[in-house]
Amino acid sequence: MNLYEMLHRDHEKVKSLFDQLEATGEDQESRRETLFAHLFRELDVHSQAEEKFFYSQLRSEDETRELTLESIDEHKMVKRLLGELEAMDKGTPEWTAKCRTLRENVEEHVEMEEQELFPMAQRVLEDEEAAGIAEDIDSFKEEHAELESY
């Protein structure tokens, strides 16, 4: 699987988790806790991997630098919202509203990434380089999955 398909697959997994969370009611706090834990982990590992392996390459290219820095700022916003949501009572309307805000932020980021950044990245990264980044991300995610199982 190529780099862009791999990242898109992650985006789809996150969208599915948001869909499942949105389908829960405020009286399903335990289910929300479980789904949110999965969402938190997916977004955390995905953003770390993107920043460490993908964005680090794109920051050094003139064509992709500005959009990459913007993407890093968007990741910071998502991490802040995740932290706030993690600390909140999952069975409240406030949590529901903030989770919706998180989803909107993530969806805007994903759209920008897939519509603007990926095409730029395809122009500046050689296929072999992109394949190497995909392997690095895959290894990083496997390593973090193993760490979590302990």
Image (spheres, rainbow, N blue to C red):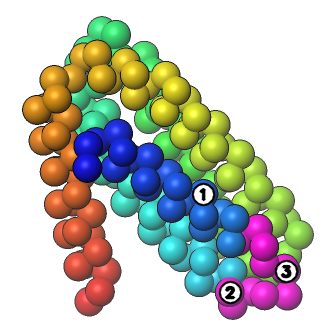
Query: Quick check: 25 above or below 18?
Result: below
- Determine crowd level at label 2: few under 14, some 14-19, many 20+ residues with C-alpha closer than 10 A: some
At 42% from the left edge and 16% from the top edge, which residue is drawn?
66
Residue 65 visible in image = no
> Considering the numbered disc 1 on the image, is that residue within a helix, a strand or a loop?
helix
| Kind of residue indicated by mark 2 | Arg
Q: Is residue 45 left or right of residue 136?
A: right
Quadrant position of residue 107: top right
Q: Is residue 84 above or below residue 123?
A: below
Tell me which label, 3 or 2, sits earlier in the chain. 3
Label 1 belongs to which residue? 15
Residue 105, picture quadrant: top right
* Residue 135: x %, y % from top left: 16, 51
Label count reads 3
Reading the image, the residue beneath label 2 is 31
Q: CA distance from mark 1 to mark 2?
A: 17 Å
Element type where label 3 sits in the image: loop
The magenta span reads 21-31
- Residue 103 percent coordinates (x, y): 68, 52
Residue 11 rendering spot, x and y as whole percentages: 50, 51
